[in-house]
Image (tube, rainbow, N blue to C red):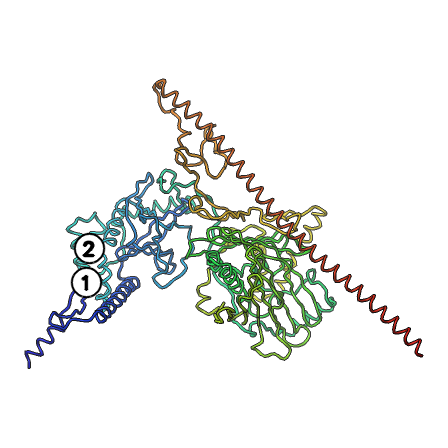
Amino acid sequence: MEETTTSTTTVQSESRMLNGVEKDCPSSTDPPLTRKESLKVQKQNYRQEKKRAAKELSSALKDPSVVIMANWLKIRGYLKSWTKLWCALKPGVLLIYKTPSADHWVGTILLSACKLIERPSKKDGFCFKLYHPLDKSIWAVKGPKGENVGSITQPLPSNYLIFRAASESDGRCWMDALEIALSCSSLYKLTAKAGKEGDISMSSESSHLLHLLQTSPLTETELLQLKEAALLGNHHMEQDAFSDKSERETHDDWDTTTNENGGRLTEESDVEPSDEMPPGPRATTYVEQSSEEMAEAGEASQVETVSHENKGLIWGLLKQLRAEMDLSKVVLPTFILEPRSFLDKLSDYYYHADLLSQASLEESAYGRIKQVLRWYLSGFYKKPKGLKKPYNPILGETFRCCWLHPQTDSCTFYIAEQVSHHPPISAFYVCNRKDGFCISGSILAKSRFYGNSLSAILDGKARLLFLSRDEEYIITMPYAHCKGILYGTMTLELGGKITIECEKTKCLAELEFKLKPFLGGSASVNLICGKILVGDELMATVDGHWDSEVFLHEKRSGQQETLWNPTPEVRSRRLKRQVVQLDQQGEFESERLWQHVTRAIMEQDQQQATKEKFILEDAQRKEVRERGDKLWIPQLFQQDPVTSEWTYKHLDIRPWDADTCLVQFEKDGVIQTHERSQRRANGVSYHHSWTSPHKVNGKHRKTSSQPSTCSQNTESSSTPEPTHESSDNEDFSNQCARCNKEKKDLALIEANIMSMQRTLKDIQRNVGALSRQMSHQRAANDSTSLTARHCLTLCILLVSQLLLNYVFT
């Protein structure tokens, strides 16, 4: 009996090693498994292996003791400028942070997809490059703590990164450590055993390994020793430091040099052929917005109880008003003001601009308008606490901000300007060329007083354009309605009907924002309903609450889905807005212009806020008097003389070309694209961006750092040249002349094509407007003639009735 038990235990305990993990396998004495049972065992092992790998990687990322090396490195961005970032090397990954505290995660590089190479450089320090051999992305989608959005930095390439260490010894140390992380996947197991013990101190063996990393390149024997030690899991690695004091001094000098250049170090001679790009532009520096006010969903956040003191101010204000009066010229008290400009408030619609990035990729027209409607609804749940109205912008006031898209490595820019004061018109432009969309529009803000209520009407349209599809969606806005001014509770609601219409695809979305009825309860607050049509076919209906959950009912399938729901998880994934620091803003930028009013409101000093607001308004009135009849010319927008719509002066609606376009950036309110400076065709170089060549020492020279074939000269040669080489130089000069002529011809052709395209679009827009006008006029004429016919018939009947009455009486 004992022998039988022993043999059974031996059979059941037989195992094999799979990727370094013990897996139970059947003994040869067991009966053979069926195909179904064998597949079940394989699937079970497959799931266990996946869980094990994910658990080991997660534990290695989260354990602060598992660090092969960590230190400051310079990283070069798209615009050839360098940023100092904290790099922490762990098994299989390289984590990049803004600070050593690891609070501001920038990105994670997956080393399993990378190759490592030393990169020569004429500058101080040591350069090396991590790259994907097939030009694929080397970045992980999420951070070590599940972050979806990294901290703001300059744009970094997606398929490679170039690093610079302070000295050659530090660079060699990083190269050796990266080679270990690239080749030794078993380092994932560091926390599997070390996590059971709370001691994070270094053993003598781990100190020896760290010493190897800090001093010299590893030999094959030492690398083998390191791998064996990693398999045993008996060591921990700490953050790397500089090897000696002299290297620290070198590092300090290196930082000082960088800071003297404004924190940006460029290298003109370190451009590889594969990284060929023009000199980097000076873009606006954005920082992440520090704070943001957001109220909860429901009626409670839209109700405000007015104090007795403020009620007196309201009564004094109401004495100056009459029914249906326009309030644009009325000076409102500061206690009802939201401490930001109306130009700022219009940007609330773009915290989920990534939904538009997804919409541009949708294949079906119905899928696109459904995604556009989802984005439209995402702009309403962000609202202030209580009943608040933003500042009326000053004429010439501007506002700019942007949102980074970590999924697509792109950026959405927002530019707005107050182009007219009476009537108050705000123009805005939103652009993300890489993700294929832009939005332009203008809003005329009107206010109407109705006794116990008033309405703020946003009269205007926004035009959403998908660049690669040439589809334009025309979008309107609801109005804001405030009631309970004289009696009752002051409550703010949205009302009216809006449309989202695409003429090209014949798609139409209609929404109605419903006001709370007189006898309605809390469930009837913020209600919306609507429908989506493609042509004349009803595709879906929409209902719900605009500040919470909205449902979509498919007519074909009869299924119901959640179109939009701003859950806490969705709110946490919203894009982080980047703004310009106050000291770098212009005099007429919103935050700087209203800073004193905002400070007083935040400190609840209404008298000071009123005083500062009066100073701005008085300065504006004085400027109007001094300008007289002279026409105001906006800085960033211009008015179409035919349609009277305001458009962005620097509009660029070309589809994104990944071969030539590098990065989109903004400077002084101008959104532009940084492109590669050269293309090669038939062995001849020419300038791509059609800019005029720079002058160097009285001679023209191309902007590229790489000399082209037709710009070479032989000034450095001091000996006479043979006759045949002089003929070659003549050929080169002739070729250069041909290049210049071709360049001018191509530039002229491109300019003519763009002008023709703009003219064609203007003609189409004007023809559409005229046709709509004619149809409205025809309908009006028909209704007028119909009414006249009815009146004539009625008169005849009346006369007949009078005659009959006269005859029979």
From this viewpoint, which residue is outermost toward the bottom? 1
| Residue 76: image location, x then y, percent | 37, 47
- Residue toward you, 527 or 205: 527
Q: Inspect the image, locate mark 2, and give the three-letter code of the amino acid beneath it.
A: Leu
| Residue 420: image location, x then y, percent | 65, 53
Question: Is 508 left or right of 43, judged from the image as shown?
Answer: right
**Quadrant of image for the C terminus:** bottom right
Q: Residues within 10 Å of mark 2 (few under 14, many from 20)?
A: many
Q: Quadrant of residue 209?
A: bottom left
Instruction: Check contact, mark 1 vs mark 2: CB within 8 A.
Output: no
Does the image show residue 602? no
- Residue toward you, 438 or 169: 438
* Circle 2 SS class: helix
| Residue 120: image location, x then y, percent | 30, 40
When the figure is inspected, residue 416 is found, relative to residue 488, above or below; the finding is: above
* Circle 1 SS class: loop
Q: Inspect the image, locate mark 1, and give the three-letter code of the amino acid beneath it.
A: Gly
The residue wearing badge 2 is 209
Q: Give me the residue at 40% from left, 58% from top.
A: 150
Q: Residues within 10 Å of mark 1 (few under 14, many from 20)?
A: few
Q: Give me the residue at 18% from left, 55% from top.
A: 226
- Residue toward you, 381 or 99: 381
Q: Earlier in the sequence, mark 1 or mark 2?
A: 1
When the figure is inspected, residue 339 is found, relative to residue 11, above or below; the finding is: above
When the figure is inspected, residue 394 is found, relative to residue 47, above or below; the finding is: above
| Residue 690: image location, x then y, percent | 49, 37
Question: Is 46 left or right of 715, judged from the image as shown?
Answer: left
Does the image show residue 517? yes
What number is the disc on residue 20?
Answer: 1
